[in-house]
Image (tube, grey):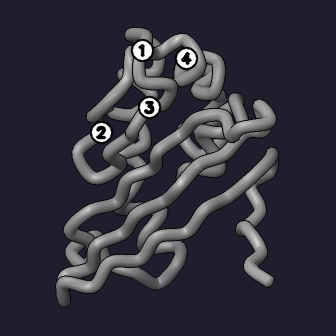
């Protein structure tokens, strides 16, 4: 979901034009946090268009989970922190809390998002 939003065309929710990285760069805190479970922007200065997109992603989440063999009830938190890294490279950090209390955090760089490699 975060990669779809980061792509700027939002194919997961139809065709939805947005530039979350530009909005994050303009935000006073330099990032935007998207809550995909509740369809809200938790941090950052998001446009009305991006707020509506977040809502659409939340509405698409049940079908997305079904397609990937998951259940929405498995998630307690499903967020992405979107911004630009030090060299102005797109970055988003996905945080998932599952129903068992485990937390998973993955960092993705670029478009499309690729996991950060740890050597």
Spatial distance from mark 2 to mark 1, Cα to Cα? 21 Å
Q: Residue at x 27, y 34 (%)?
A: 42
Task: Name the foreground residue: 116 vs 37.
Answer: 116
Q: Secondary structure at mark 1?
A: loop
Q: Using residue 57 as the reference point, say whether residue 89 is left or right of it.
A: right
Residue 39, labelled with which disc?
2
Q: Which residue is mark 1?
A: 28
* Vertical comparison of 49 with 31: above or below: above
Which of discs 1 and 4 lies nearer the camera? The answer is: 1
Which of discs 2 and 4 lies nearer the camera? The answer is: 4
Task: Name the foreground residue: 32 vs 19.
Answer: 32
Q: Which residue is mark 4?
A: 23
Q: Secondary structure at mark 2?
A: loop
* Vertical comparison of 63 with 89: above or below: below
Q: Position of residue 21 (x, y in %)?
A: 63, 27
Q: Residue at x 34, y 60 (%)?
A: 78
Which of discs 2 and 1 lies nearer the camera? The answer is: 1
Q: Secondary structure at mark 4?
A: helix
Spatial distance from mark 1 to mark 3, Cα to Cα? 10 Å
* Vertical comparison of 11 with 97: above or below: above
Q: Earlier in the sequence, mark 2 or mark 3?
A: 3
Q: Using residue 90 as the reference point, say whether residue 43 is left or right of it.
A: left
Q: Which residue is mark 3?
A: 32
Quadrant showing the C terminus: bottom right
Which of discs 1 and 3 lies nearer the camera? The answer is: 1
Spatial distance from mark 2 to mark 3, Cα to Cα? 13 Å
Q: Residue at x 46, y 70 (%)?
A: 105
Q: Residue at x 39, y 15 (%)?
A: 45
* Vertical comparison of 39 with 3: above or below: above
Tell me if label 3 and label 4 are in contact, CB under 8 Å.
Answer: yes
Q: Earlier in the sequence, mark 3 or mark 4?
A: 4
Q: Earlier in the sequence, mark 2 or mark 1?
A: 1
């Amino acid at each position: 979901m975060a990669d779809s939003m980061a792509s700027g065309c939002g194919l997961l929710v139809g065709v939805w034009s947005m530039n979350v990285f530009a909005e994050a760069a303009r935000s006073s805190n330099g990032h935007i946090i998207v809550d995909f479970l509740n369809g809200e922007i938790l941090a950052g200065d998001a446009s009305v268009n991006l707020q509506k997109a977040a809502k659409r992603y939340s509405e698409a989440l049940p079908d997305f989970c079904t397609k990937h063999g998951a259940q929405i009830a498995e998630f307690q938190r499903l967020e992405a922190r979107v911004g630009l890294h030090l060299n102005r490279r797109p970055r988003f950090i996905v945080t998932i809390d599952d129903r068992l209390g485990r937390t998973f955090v993955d960092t993705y760089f670029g478009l499309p998002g690729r996991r950060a490699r740890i050597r």
